[in-house]
Image: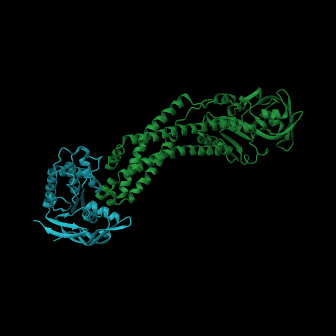
Chain colours: A green, B cyan
Amino acid sequence: MSITLRLAWRNIWRHPRRTLLTSSAIAFAAAILVFMVTLQRSSYDKMIDFTLRVYHGHLQVQPKGYLDKPQIRNTIPDARALASHIRRLSGSASLSVRAMGFALASSKERSYGVQVLGVETENESHVSTIPGLVRKGRFLSSDDAQEAIIGYLLARNLKLNVGEELTLLGTGRDGSVAATVVPVVGIFESGSADLDRQLVQLPLGAFQDVFSMGNHGHTIVVVGESLEHLEELQRAVRSGLPPESSLVVLNWEALLPGLKQAIQMDWVSGWFLYASLIIIVSFSILNTFLMSVLERTREFGIMLALGARPGRIGVLVIVEAVWLALLGLAVGVVIGTATVIYFHIYGFSYPGMEELAAHYNMPAVIHLALSPLSLTLGPAVILLVTCAAALYPALRIRLLKPADAMKAV
Amino acid sequence: MEQNVICRGLSKTYQQDAIIVQALSGIDLDVPKGDFVCLSGPSGSGKTTLLNLVGGLDAPTGGEITVAGQRVDLMSQAQLATMRLMHLGFVFQAYNLIPVLTARENVEFVMQLQGMDRKERRARARAILEDVGLEGLENRRPAQLSGGQQQRVAVARAMVSGPSLVLADEPTANLDSRNGEMLLELMRKMNEGRGVTFIIATHEQLVMDHARRLIRLHDGRIVSDELQR
């Protein structure tokens, strides 16, 4: 061990109580950060996965430009055959074909503009939680059945109940009038007010008949096992597209940019809280090092007299800070990681979350994900802040004049 | 004779609040290589100030200082640090060892700053600690050594890097007469055996008796400069 490292290590133990107090503060902050950052990131993963599984899926195959301008004429020809082909290439991923149009939905009393979605009744439950969120009645029975399910807010607005008839009037792919009268067989509550207010689902076959779609669809929704391997899945899906087709594979970030932005905002606001914690700890460190430097002014004067350059003594102070930080971080990371491992195995639940989760068909507990980034990000920031806090006392050493410093008591 | 230290018209003033204190005034001094000089005088006569100026620990207000052929008064802080490291050794009144390092590590510290490799550092530190009679105490920290032993470590630290000039400020002030005598003998041995120049500031008769040359200061001026033997 070099003399600087040894000297720094021994210097921090000149006042064991002070060192233990300061490193305890660092350990506490590190443990909190490891746990909170991991919980936050795990919550995001859960939130993204849950949000995507309601409706959008992890990936969607769409005609180019459809996302920005969802025109009924812009279609995927022979969509079911293409979905079968991609299914074979993409391993364990789930796929479902959808077609979408807009219509005026009317009950006996009222009319509203709605989004009409044709879904593969057998596959839709693998890519969307809506089939499992039907609160009244049932989900669609078969692809050719002439029936519909609607969101509970739309049902309330139209004053419709299960068993009553819904009239849809729109425009078909060929420009013809698309009109049908179907019984409402189920009412769902997805947790998304937009979907619950605007969405009508028909079996894909029925939709294709009514909207003159032939065998065309608009999107193929893909859900993989997890978000971790999304890029690989996206590559596999892309490889299954016909050459020179105008189809594109969009991931959830493109499909739901607002979700990503919301997460980024939450992540940043979370860091404001963490920053307050880190700032409090950094003041404790700054205080420790200012005291440490002030009480050793005479010793630093001697070192300068012996020929040490101020920069070298500054480095010594920084190394002391690093030792102190590593001491606290080692303890903090062990405690934080042990806590994360516990909740990784047994799961973490926010108070009151069980009821809400059960209502929306989502898991009540979050099993914290062990990731190197989550475990090291907070401690790395603390290490940087500790070094930064020691920088000021270290720089003060440059101002010392050996003769004056040696007179210090 | 080759001069190790040359001072010409050296002066130093301090400002204490509104009062200007003339610590040194018009000092002309030549110290040949290998000399053993004692600066004496009452408190406030300028002994420590003169040592600090010669050692580059403080800057003069006027005049010139040359040490080992280099103009100290014209050097930058970095150059002064290098000069202190490579050419000078210091012994202070209060021992001033680094408390968390052992005797050997204190002695090695300067050599480490010089960038000497570990093996050579170890060998030199062992040899000089033997020379100053501290064999077997190398791994003790300063708090585990007596005042005399600590001051011998300080002398070993000052000597180990082979300086041409050692500046000692009241080195025996905190020692009893026996330890003081031993320390002075040690310094004389280093002076005669290695040809190192010593300038010692003191007001103790014991030290003055050991000096080859005695310079008396009063109110920042040299009032006498005598060869003793």
**Which residue is at a point 43% across and 42% down the rendered structure image?**
A22
Does residue B51 lie above or below A269 as drawn? below
Question: In the figure, is residue B74 to the left or right of A110?
Answer: left
Q: Residue A13's quadrant in the figure?
A: top left
Q: Is residue A145 visible?
A: yes
Question: Percent position (x, y) of residue A329?
Answer: 44, 41
Question: In the figure, is residue B120 to the left or right of A116?
Answer: left
Q: Is residue A138 visible?
A: no
**Which residue is at a point 85% across and 44% down the rendered structure image?**
A175
Query: Which residue extends farthest right?
Result: A108
Question: Percent position (x, y) of residue A362?
Answer: 65, 30
**Which residue is at a point 54% across and 40% down the rendered structure image?**
A37
Residue sitting nearer the eye, B173 or A239? B173
Query: Which residue extends farthest front?
Result: B19
**Which residue is at a point 14% across and 54% down the rendered structure image?**
B181
Residue sitting nearer the eye, A403 or A398? A403
Residue sitting nearer the eye, B44 or B91? B44
Question: In the figure, is residue A165 to the left or right of A372?
Answer: right
The number of discs equals 0
Question: Percent position (x, y) of residue A408?
Answer: 34, 55
Residue sitting nearer the eye, A209 or A202? A202
